[in-house]
Image (tube, rainbow, N blue to C red):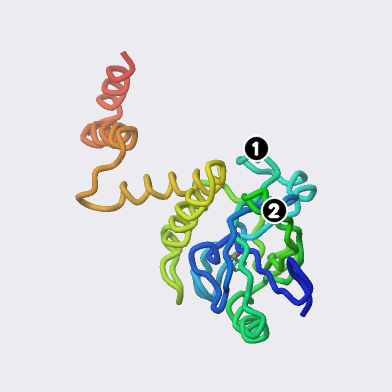
Amino acid sequence: MGEGGAPGEFWLFGYGSLIWKPPPHYDQRIPGFIKGYVRRFWQASEDHRGTPEAPGRVVTLIERPFWETLEDVHSVSDDKVWGVAYRIRPDKVEEVQQYLDIREINGYSIHYTPFYPADREIPTIRCMVYIGLPNNPQFVGSQDPERLAEHILRSKGPSGENKEYLLMLERALEELAIDSGDEHILDLATRLRKLEAQCTPGVTAPPEVEEAFAVDNELNRVGTTDEQEEVEKASQQ
Ligand code: BEZ
């Protein structure tokens, strides 16, 4: 189809599951980033990490000027979205495009963007990228991070548990480069681990969760409002 680093090459940029689950028939994998977008867990997934009855949440890219008009608890420290570019073998491009159309449907559309390899010796590559635009039916918009982490924790679909997608993404990003972490992903993963520790019997929660539980338990043991006030006063002293 003539897109890519050189005429006739086809390059695909992955910023979600494609980072750890590559497309078939690639012959090069390059870590790097694109610019001008913000990655957010604001796309519903009815076919991979959720179902039509209970959609999960997966990542999409939002154009930065539009993102700046939205409410978001998470900030963005630089203008990079880290991920991986794959070069597809020339004789397999059509086959892979068909595979991707099936795999990535559900609100995503095809776009092209410059990709900047982490290795600065490699020139910029024009890549195809799947984006769930704000006008697609699966785009859920800005989310409260705690509610979002809870939602991810309880969702699952044909490709597996939604939490696995988040945690795999967190780890895959950490492995790309020294500065390839993503605040939004890291915060959601941290919240999810805490929530999970709270609801898994026998698993020790982090100290701050244990502390919150200890106070709750104290209060729960108290019978009357008066007695409860005494306990609250005592714990404040
Ligand atoms: C990705 O991994 O980059 C991706 C996968 C599915 C849809 C959109 C992006």
Q: Which residue is mark 2?
A: 116
Looking at the image, do the residues carrying marks 2 and 1 touch, with CB atoms under 8 Å apart?
no
Outermost residue on the front side: it is 121
Residue toward you, 178 or 57? 178
Does dot 1 land on a helix, a strand or a loop? loop
Quarter of image, ligand 1: bottom right
Decide if residue 42 is on the left or right side of residue 109: left
**Farthest top residue in view:** 237
Report x, y in % for residue 66.
78, 50
Answer yes or no: is residue 164 visible.
yes
Residue 234: where, in percent of width, then height? 27, 17
Q: Residue at x 61, y 67 (%)?
A: 86
Q: Please determine whether, in this image, residue 185 is positioned above or below residue 235.
A: below
Image coords of residue 100 (percent x, y):
62, 78
Where is residue 78 drawn, in percent x and y? 67, 40
Image side of residue 118 versus residue 198, left or right: right
Which residue is under mark 1? 77
Label 1 neighbourhood size at 10 Å, few (<14), some (14-19), many (20+)? Answer: few
Mark 2: secondary structure: strand
